[in-house]
Image (cartoon, rainbow, N blue to C red):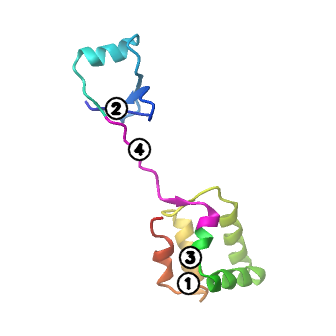
Amino acid sequence: MSWTYADTEQSMITDGAGRFVPVDPANTAYAALLAGGEAIGAYAAPDLPPSLTPLQFIDRLTDTEQTALATAAMTQAPIKIWYDKLLAADQLDLRDPRLAAGLQAMAAAGLLAPSRVPELLGAP
């Protein structure tokens, strides 16, 4: 079994399967791991989905694209609803199918060039 540090302070280790053990010599589970010769690997940052804040995402749009979306949102309810949801999010997961579907709908409506969809969904 392979254990790694679960935090940058190296106060907790994990086996990656949901088991955590405090790094404390007084902890019997930790002492047993050390006595058994278990190796403890370095801390590895969690693999988080690529995400942006709504402002960071909107900044990816050109001024012309932003104007086209804002103008369309004033007269087309589906675009307004999608745009409102985009703004209401704390973080945007660039792999979220709702984000991709919305951008594809914007491209289909002529508000974005189709080639911009994969660019906008690319990693930060």
Q: Are marks 3 and 4 in contact (CB under 8 Å)?
A: no
Give the class, few, some or many, for how many residues have Cα within 10 Å of label 2's Cα (few <14, many ≥20): some
Q: Classify mark 4: helix, strand or loop.
A: loop
Q: Which residues are magenta?
A: 42-56
Pointer 2 or 3: first along the chain = 2
Which secondary structure, mark 2?
A: loop
Identify residue for label 3: 103
CA–CA distance between discs 1 and 2?
44 Å
Q: Position of residue 25 (x, y in %)?
A: 37, 13
User: Can you say which quadrant of the picture contains the N terminus?
Assistant: top left
Q: Kindly identify the residue that appears in the image at 56 percent across and 84 percent down.
A: 107
Q: Is residue 76 above or below residue 49?
A: below
Q: Which residue is mark 1?
A: 107
Q: Inspect the image, locate mark 3, and give the three-letter code of the amino acid beneath it.
A: Leu
Confirm whether the magenta stretch covers residue 45: yes
Q: Which mark is residue 15?
A: 2
Task: Write the residue at 34% across / 32% down.
Answer: 15
Say whether residue 65 is left or right of residue 6: right
The main secondary structure of the magenta stretch is loop
- The tag earlier along the polypeptide, 1 or 2, is 2
Question: Mark 2–mark 4 contact, CB under 8 Å?
Answer: no
Alpha-carbon neighbours of circle 3 within 10 Å: few (<14), some, or many (≥20)?
A: many
Q: Do residues under tags 1 and 3 come within 8 Å of each other at their CB atoms?
A: yes
State the residue position of label 4: 45
Dot 1 amino acid type? Ala
Q: Nearer the viewer, mark 2 or mark 4?
A: 4
Look at the image and say whether residue 21 sits in the magenta stretch.
Answer: no
